[in-house]
Amino acid sequence: MTDFLLELRSEEIPARMQAGARENLAKLFTAELAKAGLSAGEIVTYAGPRRLALIARGLPAATEAVSEEVKGPRASAPPQALEGFLRKTGLTREQLTERDGVLFAITEKPGRATAQVLAEAIPAIVRAFPWPKSMRWGAESASTESMRWVRPLHAIVALFGAEVVPFEIAGITSGNVTRGHRFHAPAEIVLTGADTYVEQLRAAKVLVDQDERAAIIRERASALAAEAGLELVEDEGLVAENAGLTEWPVPLLGRFDEAYLDVPPEVIQLTARVNQKYFVCRSTDGKLANAFVCTANIEATDGGAKIVEGNGKVLAARLSDARFFYETDLKTKLDDLRPKLEKIVFHEKLGTVADKVERVAKLARWLVEEGIVGATPSPHRGEGGDPRQGRGEGEGQPGSASPVSAPHPGPLPDGERERLADLAERAAYLAKADLVTGMVGEFPELQGLMGGYYAAAQGEDPRVAEAVRDHYKPVGQGDDVPTALVTVAVALADKLDSVAQFFMVGLKPSGSKDPFALRRAALGIASTIQQNGLRLPFYAASIRAMGNVDHGSTEMMDFIIDRLKVQQREAGVRHDLIDAVFALGGEDDLVRLLARVHALQAFVTTDDGTNLLAGYKRAANILKKEGVEGDQAWSAPTYTLEPAEADLIAALDAAEPKAAEAVQAEDFEVAMAALASLRAPIDRFFDDVTVNDADPAKRTARLALLARVRAAVHTVADFSRIEG
């Protein structure tokens, strides 16, 4: 077995493209080998700023000879069929083999040298390589047929063992020569094979392994910060980016003027990260320090002093610009910036950002005034009631079965609720004003955050400033979910408005396309409701968000539910249990739905749950076979009951009201415990009683009894959806 080395050396490959390039190179190489019936024992890929490399270990010297057999027509088939088969195979009648009256075309394909396969495969891979962006260069670039690469390709190394695999691509001939570090070792290096590749390049001051470069940057940057009595602000994305920018990484610590620490720390960190690819440090008290770590691509003779000095000057210039934006923005009140939002189009079908602000402010106020945010309305809404009816406020607290307890128990006094409503409305009016500030214009990632700083600086209530800062949260999985009352109202209103408005004008996500990030907004809505235990009447809220006109609130609810299902599955909840609860319908309280799901997940893992499920399914199967759908009118039988029949009726008489009362109180564990009491009576009923009795009256009554069992179980979940 022999190893193969491929190195594609070019001008600088953008760091963001390197991981994908490694993956695509391995995938394309594997596919090309498979076409020839070859596979490698192991494939390793490397990427850096000036080279993309692959090592395939354990390749045979040649492919195996193969015999291909193609079945043809019968020997007695019409001449036309035979002629068509001969044209397809390129053989004559005499070259066909006949077996049991059927003709076969058998072609022997001799083995090929692996080097020959590679000589054909590599040019195909290079020409088909899927760079996100690529270019043409040189005189040939005048033709659209010329080769494209991410940056001009300079050289190709292709070694099978110690031998060069010969081929040519766009005037570049494969060989065994590469170059090391641009400054430390610019001379040509003759490579001897895959086994020595990494060490030969290391000797030339090139670390080809991206993971090794990343480890050096991560560890040395942390060590430099520690030596200065500081702590590095970890940033794995920045580690990977610096590893993609350097072949011989040398982290260096520098300082900047402490005066710049008056600028918000997020601004300093983003300025250093985005513009300069620098890490920042914090002191032991957690505050940002006036230190940065840059990553050089060279070992300087002065220990990096000049590099640090130069980088410090560049960073100072960037921070000076940032401070200018910050100080200039502070001179203008957020209120005075709001008119500028009338000139920013939110969407051509939905008006301006100013229009959105008006909608969000009204919705945020409604959420507080209705007691949805800032109080816990009564959970005692009847099952089967119209979910589109809004809920009263402050009549009770959710039961203990709720997966997340509401953090703000009990209704608020009217005066305090009105005050919170005013604050939520005020925060919503200011929340988008920072979009027209200089700082957010320079760093769009800081929207919301800068508004919070500016709101605090101009003397707004701290709750308003916090809501302005955090109203975009959560922006993705793992992000913090707001819990402060005013922030929750504005954040929820903002996301509800976005989903409702885009649904209202028919701009819904489809397939993998979600240009307005509505799936993310839906998950944010679900997470906010869940985390805060909000008793949100979802249909009422969605209609409210649509301007009090129902333009598809049911569809919007289904969309939110679908995202919630995905979230719960990813959290480890069984999909069939989610479906069993959500299939009941007539429910728009996400907290209550999840309480049922979590209680059901705990119940079905018990012996009682397993046996009740078995009994339910047996009853449901009989009812299905007999065509008994839906609820049946129940009345006590007039004939003499068999003991097991009477026991089941008595058990249902006791369990049904207990389960219904527990469901009403949202204590789903108690509801399921009540249903679990049916387990033994159901088993005895099936053992001792003939359902399909010859007496029509008994048969009808017993089927109705099984329908009653089914209906009782359905007060908690649709057990027909549960697997097992």
Image (cartoon, helix red, strand yellow):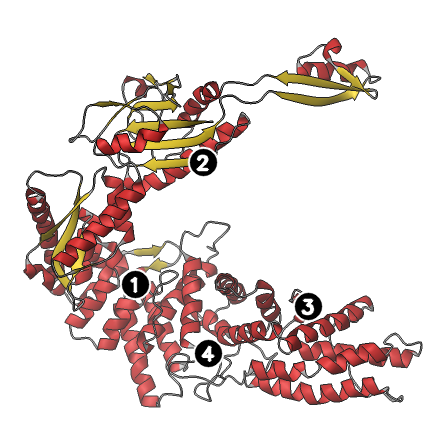
Q: Quadrant of the C terminus?
A: bottom right
Which residue corresponds to mark 2? 42
Depth-wise, is mark 2 or mark 1 nearer the camera? 2
Of the residues under marks 4 and 3, which one precedes in the sequence?
Answer: 4
Depth-wise, is mark 1 or mark 3 nearer the camera? 3
Which residue corresponds to mark 1? 354
The residues bearing labels 2 and 3 have C-alpha atoms spaced at a distance of 48 Å
Q: Label 4 amino acid?
A: Arg
Residue at 30% x, 70% y: name it: 428
Element type at mark 4 = loop
On the image, the x and y values in percent for residue 383 come to 60, 80
The reply to whether discs 4 and 3 touch (Cβ–Cβ < 8 Å) is no
Q: Residues within 10 Å of mark 3 (few under 14, many from 20)?
A: some
On the image, the x and y values in percent for residue 233 come to 22, 58
Of the residues under marks 1 and 4, which one precedes in the sequence?
Answer: 1
Q: Label 1 amino acid?
A: Ala
- Image quarter of residue 13: top left
Of the residues under marks 4 and 2, which one precedes in the sequence?
Answer: 2
Depth-wise, is mark 4 or mark 2 nearer the camera? 2
The residues bearing labels 1 and 4 have C-alpha atoms spaced at a distance of 29 Å
Which residue corresponds to mark 4? 535
Instruction: Please state which of residues 60 and 629 is positioned toward the viewer in this rendering.
Output: 60
Depth-wise, is mark 1 or mark 4 nearer the camera? 4
Of the residues under marks 2 and 1, which one precedes in the sequence?
Answer: 2
Of the residues under marks 1 and 3, which one precedes in the sequence?
Answer: 1
Q: Residues within 10 Å of mark 2 (few under 14, many from 20)?
A: few
Q: Label 3 amino acid?
A: Ser
Which residue corresponds to mark 3? 720
